[in-house]
Image: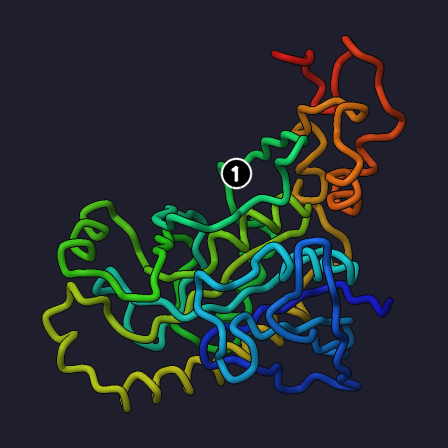
Amino acid sequence: MEQAEIGIIGGSGLYAMPGLAEAREVVIHTPFGDPSDAYILGLLEGRRVAFLARHGRGHRILPQELNFRANIHGFKQLGVVRILSASAVGSLKEEHKPADFVVPDQFVDRTKARIATFFGHGIVVHTGFSDPVCPEVARVLDAACEHAQVTHKLGGTYICIEGPQFSTKAESNLYRSWGMDVIGMTALQEAKLAREAEICYASLAMVTDYDCWHPAHDAVTVEQILAVLNQNAHNAAAVLRQAVAGLPQTRSCKCGSALQHAIMTEADQIPPETRRRVRLLVEKYLAPQRGAGAEGPAGRKAGA
């Protein structure tokens, strides 16, 4: 299978990656189903990149219909070790204006019915998620925004809602009272699954408009939102291209060993079908198998 080192997930308005040389489509099937679309592989700033349109080309897939597991596992199958994600968001603070970017460092989950783990069905894994984005990749995105002269903020909290409906005013004001920065529907599950896949992840949150708390919200027209989406897509392409160029060749973060002390189940207790499904993610930690009563792969006594 063809390989890449950097993954890019394009959100609303960003359905292709300008400047991708030697581009070719790669269709991938995963143990968790099919991703949103074919991956577009090519060279960007001399780096091997795989691009995926989150909602499919033509924006065909609702947020709660997304197969997040397949999307992230597909990147893993391609050999990707870092993911740069772009997504459209609403602003919950006056300071984050339409066309501004935010590089969030925290998430709050308000989704209800989404699968956000590769595990279960006979294997128990508890990954650390106190710092949900890779600090190394976030800093690179910050520097890339500076280089592209895009107004932005490094840090902030992204609240992820179920959708597809937007918030009520009561909800929007509640989230503001919690200190949330931006509101979206997609990035949290990607971050959780990337952590389980030991892939570095950071998100570029592109503000399209103020959420419905804002007194001027009802005056925003579809034409204005589309104009901001187009501007954001143009700016995001410039930022992502610069970020790809700025990523170090080697990783100095802890993302690549996120499962080292997270697997609780003894290898010989994992059902064969489950082990097959998660082999790409965990096999390096499961062999050789350990006997009953010994410390498990997580470095903790079984049953502790």
- The furthest residue to the left: 215
Q: Toward the viewer: 284 or 37? A: 37
Query: Residue 15's quadrant in the figure?
Result: bottom right
How busy is the neighbourhood of tag 1: few (under 14 within 10 Å), some, or many (20 plus)? Answer: some
Which amino acid, mark 1?
Answer: Phe
- x and y, in percent, of residue 267 in the image: 79, 26
Report how many numbered discs are placed on residues in the image: 1
Is residue 157 rendered to the left or right of residue 186? Answer: left
Is residue 304 rendered to the left or right of residue 232? Answer: right
Query: Residue 276's quadrant in the figure?
Result: top right
- Give the colouring mode of the picture: rainbow
Q: Can you identify the residue that label 1 sits on?
A: 129
Is residue 273 rendered to the left or right of residue 159? Answer: right
Is residue 20 rendered to the left or right of residue 134? Answer: right
- The furthest residue to the top: 293
Residue 171 lies, with reference to residue 245, above or below; the image says above
Quadrant containing the N terminus is bottom right
What residue is at 55 percent from the left and 80 percent from the top? Answer: 238
What residue is at 72 percent from the left and 50 percent from the top? Answer: 251
Could you tell me which secondary element the residue under label 1 belongs to? Answer: loop
Residue 253 lies, with reference to residue 7, above or below; the image says above
What residue is at 41 percent from the left and 85 percent from the top? Answer: 231
Residue 74 lies, with reference to residue 97, above or below; the image says above
Quadrant containing the C terminus is top right
- x and y, in percent, of residue 77 in the image: 77, 58
- x and y, in percent, of residue 289 in the image: 86, 24
- x and y, in percent, of residue 210 in the image: 24, 70
